[in-house]
Image: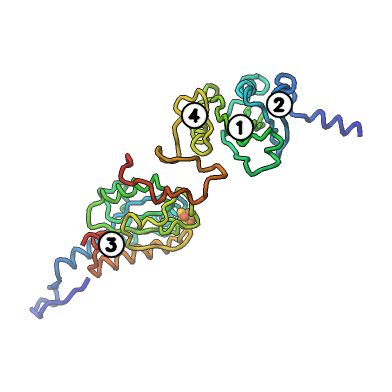
Amino acid sequence: MGLDFGPDTGTDGNIITTTIDKVVNWGRKNSLWPMPFGTACCAIEMMATLASKFDLSRFGSEAIRFSPRQSDLLIVSGRISIKMMPVLKRIYDQMPDPKWVISMGACASCGGVFDTYTLIQGVDQFIPVDVYIPGCPPRPEDLIDAVLQVQQKIASGASPKGVEAIL
Amino acid sequence: MNEEKEVEEQSKPLVLEKLEANHADTLLAQDESRGTVVVVVRKEQAYAVLEYLKTDPELAYTYLVDVTAVDNSQMESELIQFDYARFMVIYQLYSYQGQCRVRVKVPVHENDLSISSVTGLWRAANWLERETYDMFGIHFEGHPDLRRILMPDDFEGHPLRKDYPLQGRGERERFNFDKQNV
Ligand code: SF4
């Protein structure tokens, strides 16, 4: 959290100093609200990650929201067709800033083995992606790792890709 | 030898017997594939045959499992057998009563892609026929709402035809992502 103990005031270290950004980021990092966008097999692994065995709530991300307006982490897990891409874009646009995006699996990241007439070859052509997860499908541990990477990114004070794109 | 023949005759499926008795003129071919009776019928009489299969009280193929098609343009053997009909529209039926399946295949020529819709017999045919229209361009006459179902409305072409390139004709690049109603 980047804490420093305050000057010795005789209060046995009960005063700490920090910056407001650090406190806010600490809160954001530990309470990511994911918006699942599961369109194919990867979504099954995402569900497993959220369920009790792998239990994403250990990392403060158990509050899954199916309304983009209440979430700040978009998990794109699965194939996105050209017909679905406008929907995904709309959902991304509806999420309030600051927001982060995880592209889960080979299909979301680059089209995977589906180099076909209907499939988007990587959602990052249309929405900014912060963390990519390789694999087909990635294991739940990989998704947890990605969430932890997003957390690290938030803690470090770095802007989400979406903000970088505007700046 | 004789005994064997008898056994064979006894095991002839009821559906084939009845079709031969009632619709012999329309049967182009018959076959058996992994326990499923396969019949090929003329397009003109296809509706009548399907209606017969559904409504005959002994057969009662009341469940339409699937409607789909095959593009045989690269299957020389099939083309020769069925008068160079490019497409084969396929109906999969199941009878709860007889607990058996039948597959009805209908050859469709490329220069006349229309075929009667069976939405009047099975309401389930609605979306299945739309999919077959979307993917192969078969026109189902009498369908209440023959629109694309999988591809976007402004998509051109029918992607499951064998002459459609796998990576498309540039739709991925040309697709207008802003003008879509979402
Ligand atoms: S990457 Fe593999 S598991 Fe994930 S959606 Fe694609 S095909 Fe399915």
Does ligand 1 reach within 8 Å of label 1's beta carbon? no
Q: Are marks 4 and 3 in contact (CB under 8 Å)?
A: no
Question: Which residue carries the number 4 mark?
Answer: B126
Image coordinates for residue A126, horizontal then vertical, percent: 33, 54
Image coordinates for residue A38, horizontal then vertical, percent: 40, 50
Secondary structure under the numbered disc 3 in the rendered image: helix
Rendered image: mark on residue A105: none
Same chain shared by disc 3 and disc 1: no
* Residue sitting at the far bottom: A8
Q: Quadrant of residue B80?
A: top right
Secondary structure under the numbered disc 2 in the rendered image: strand
Rendered residue at 30%/60% (across/down): A60
- Local crowd at mark 1 within 10 Å, few (<14), some, or many (≥20)? some
Question: Which residue carries the number 1 mark?
Answer: B109
Q: Quadrant of residue A49?
A: bottom left
Secondary structure under the numbered disc 4 in the rendered image: helix
- Nearer to the camera, A162 or A30: A162
* Vertical position of residue A141 compared to residue A2: above or below: above
Same chain shared by disc 2 and disc 4: yes
Question: Which residue carries the number 3 mark?
Answer: A161
Distance from the alpha carbon under mark 3 to that under mark 1:
53 Å
> Sequence order check: which comes first, mark 4 or mark 1?
1
Image coordinates for residue A76, horizontal then vertical, percent: 37, 54
Rendered residue at 60%/23% (across/down): B47
Question: Which residue carries the number 2 mark?
Answer: B27
Q: Amino acid at mark 4?
A: Asn
Image coordinates for residue B45, horizontal then vertical, percent: 64, 22
- Local crowd at mark 4 within 10 Å, few (<14), some, or many (≥20)? some
Q: Are marks 2 and 1 in contact (CB under 8 Å)?
A: no
